[in-house]
Amino acid sequence: MRYYKFFKTMLMIITELIKDKNRHQEYLEAPMLSERKSYLEYLRSKGYKDDYLKKTSLFLLRIVRILPIGNKPLAFETVSVSIKCFCQESQLGITSEKHMVRTAMKWIRFIGLSNLDGLMEAPVLNSLFPRRQSRARMASAPMLAEREAFLKHSRNLGYSDNYLRLMAYIQLHVVQNLSVCPRIPFSTKEIILSAEKYACGGKQSDSNVIYRKGVFTRVAMSWLDFLGIQVTKNTSFCFNEYAEEYLRFLFDEKNYSKHTIKGKRKVLCCMLPVLGQIHPELFTMQPEHIDMFLTSIHKEWNISRRTLAEYISHLRSFLQYAATQNWCSDKLSLALKLPRLYSEDGLPFAPEKEQVLGAVQFYSDFNSKTNIRNYAIMMLLSVYGIRTHELVSLQLNDIDWDKETILFRRSKGERAQVFPLTVNVGNAIIRYLTEVRINDSSQKSLFQCMVPPYRGLSHNAVYPIVSKALRGQGMELRHYGPHALRHWTATRLVNEGFPLYNVSRQLGHENPDSTRIYAKVNLKTLSKVAEMNWEDLL
């Protein structure tokens, strides 16, 4: 009877967490049912949400099948190696591996099978960490004897307990995030990147981050030297690795948006490999190498002066950061000069009204479900002039049908703007929603792919839709993507006499000055002016 009640209680927990009924029996028949149940109940009593409990129950199901669980305590190395082998065989990522190891160690400590005997042979760590949880964390990590020996050596040198405790935490970070092996040398780049991760682990002030980075580097270098591990100076690694480190700085320190980081990564990953072919070492690169590179891409890539200026701006910012990291000389960024730009050079080229109407009507054959979706997309792009990111970010609840409004999340500035929903655009969207879209409650994106699993439309999927329609009109444009329709919307509004402020708001520009480029001279109007008879005024 008692077993029946226990089984029923466990079944209730599984039913609440696992919605797939076919898997309930799998969870109930796995070993150590009572231990798993008690741990889940403990986590629930601590206020953990069901999503976390569901993930934990899955990990526990795997753990009891992977680990050789018996009456003897389990060491960290046994847990780590077993889970690592399982993740490699199952093709699971490093993130899943870390989560499983963490869950396993917490659960093992909860049921009393954690190997804490190691601290009996580590008196320094035992004295530094009187709390049971902290001692268990230190004991379960790899290289206990090596960490204890270095701390004992440091104590003999006269370091305080507070500093020794800090050293112990740094050692813990090193063995958990770096592969420490006496036979394999370390590079300074690995240590620096690990120091960045360690220093920025919490909300720290700039001065504190610099201090933590310095302390981590000194302690890690000293401990590796104590172990006899060679540390090599790494001055020549892949240019793309330099770029990723630079982009990480922009995201973490400068708070650049993910969209901006993506654009910068695209440009740098195109330029830096070519620059590496001209001169493979950034540390010994000279200004003449930069000149050769710019001349090469300007000719071979057939880019405009304005595009070249944009590329130079990206490269100069990168080289300025590289100089602060001692990757290269500061002369490189100082040698970069922007090309002269003329007032009419690189002005946005927009298609004519008839061409845009033809492009929209390109998808007017509503016998095709794909055409119904693409027609709604073309209507949104041509009427509102929104960016690709703003289109694919649209969600179902962004349209208020009662108030007849639509909300756009601007890709720049992270702002949201509400606009009136025009009749033609609204009708196009309604037709798409009623006849085409798979109305799955779990999918919030307005526009979906046309094939299973019906995910939200990606950025890369929008360009072919617009390009096919514009090219179908037989026009020659500089660009055939969604931005051509954005240029047309802006140019149309300016030429019709709308104030620049209103046009700027329509386009989502943070600064109205960005809109002034569309206020170019209307050549057709000037032609009419030139043809007038001015003889009476002469």
Image: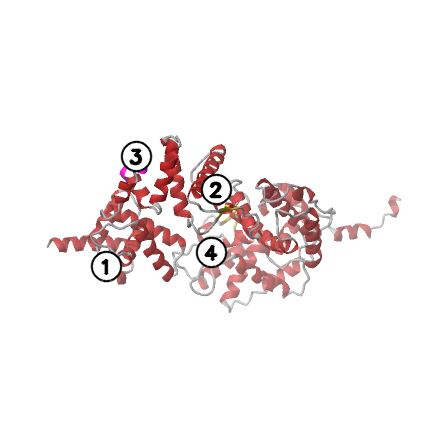
Q: Nearer the viewer, residue 454 or 321?
A: 321
Query: How far separated are the C-alphas under marks 3 and 4?
Result: 59 Å
Inspect the magenta stretch and tell me whether residue 125 lies in it: yes
Q: Secondary structure at mark 1?
A: loop
Q: Are marks 1 and 3 in contact (CB under 8 Å)?
A: no
Q: Disc 3 designates what residue?
A: 127
Tell whether 396 sits left or right of 263: left
Amino acid type, callout 3? Ser
Q: Disc 2 designates what residue?
A: 196
Amino acid type, callout 1? Ala
Query: How far separated are the C-alphas under marks 1 and 3?
Result: 40 Å
Q: Position of residue 154 (x, y in %)?
A: 39, 35
Q: Disc 1 designates what residue?
A: 30
Q: Disc 4 designates what residue?
A: 446
Circle 3 or circle 4, nearest the eye: 3
Q: Is residue 172 above or below residue 357?
A: above
The earlier-in-sequence mark between 1 and 3 is 1
| Residue stretch in magenta | 123-132
Tell whether 171 sits left or right of 47: right
The crowding category of the residue bearing disc 2, from other C-alpha atoms within 10 Å (few below 14, some 14 to 19, many at least 20), is: some
Circle 1 or circle 3, nearest the eye: 3
Please identify the quarter of the rendering in which residue 147 is found.
Answer: top left
The earlier-in-sequence mark between 1 and 2 is 1
The earlier-in-sequence mark between 3 and 2 is 3
